[in-house]
Image (spheres, grey):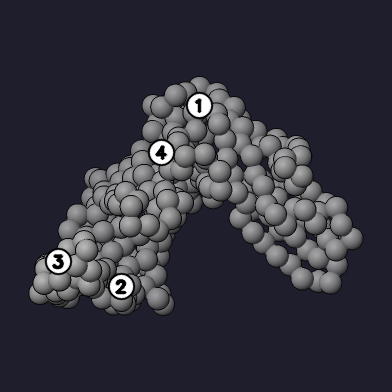
Amino acid sequence: MILITCLSALFFGCDRQIPIPNIDSKPVLSINAFINDSLGISARLSTSESIQNFDTINPITDAIITIQNGDNSFKSDLISHENGFYTLDLPKTDKKMDFKITTSYEGYADIFATTTFYPKPSQFKIDTHAIQFSGAPMYEIKVQIEDIESTPNYYLFEANFHLTYKNGIKKSSKSYTFSNHPFVENKDIIVDNFELSRIFISDKFFDGQSAEIPFFAQDTNLILLQSNLVESCEMDIDITSVSKEVYQYFKALERLKNIGSSNFTTTIQIPSNIENGTGVFGTLMHYKKVFVLK
């Protein structure tokens, strides 16, 4: 039992003690596993220790991670690499397919999760132009989505800038993004929608239809874009179509990053679809377009 003796008789009385209970949190397995659009799976496995332990992440390289499809025609163990990283190529399919992942490691309860892979991706068209905002250059990006009907699509938009200086130094940075479009689901992440690393959109507003979603990208490094210091600059627009569980996971991480650390902030629960453990198992499809700005 940990005891905190109060120091101020003004607030508590000189002899008062406040008991704080010990937190008994058994370690569990933690896995982040993603099936990508080329039907390869990558996973990172670790242990999640008690919050009283400062070393909270311990990679595991000798576990057994098995994946199988819904009709049990395929089942295989993932290949272990360094730092708790595992990979495997999956059988190609042109139909919707369910997958189950199971992880076993001595001394821990087995963990497992399921997800559904949809093989047909949505189509995207992207356009952009520069504008001025508060004295600094900013880019408006318009994303045209041809959404696939009856497929639960969840989208993450990101922008990255890559500057090459005349002295040979290269710098890359993720831009701040924001959007006030009614389809964008950022309002429950941060109040003013600014300084987000991603734009979050689900297709519940336009399932199976075409939708144009504008958002803005800004980086303080762009102030130097027109100077003699910068040789060239590229902007990457990354769109990732993810499953619902991955969408909710990254959305919670974004909120956790933006809400800051304070004794008065609301505790953020990171969602997980991993049974007996923690983390996320889901799918993602990636699309990127590069714009040469200078």
Q: Name which residue type carries label 2.
A: Thr
Residue in the image at 31% along x and 77% along y? 55
Cβ atoms at labels 2 and 4 below 8 Å apart: no
Depth check, mark 4 against mark 1: the one in front is 4
Label 2, secondary structure: give it: loop
Closest to the observer, 60 or 89: 60
The alpha-carbon separation of the residues under discs 2 and 4 comes to 28 Å
**Above-or-below relation of 43 to 2:** above
Q: Position of residue 281 (x, y in %)?
A: 32, 53
Q: Of the residues under marks 4 and 1, which one precedes in the sequence?
A: 1
Q: Of the residues under marks 2 and 1, which one precedes in the sequence?
A: 2
Residue in the image at 81% along x and 71% along y? 168
Tell me where residue 102 sits by quadrant: bottom left
Closest to the observer, 216 or 272: 216
Q: Position of residue 106 (x, y in %)?
A: 17, 75
The alpha-carbon separation of the residues under discs 4 and 1 comes to 13 Å
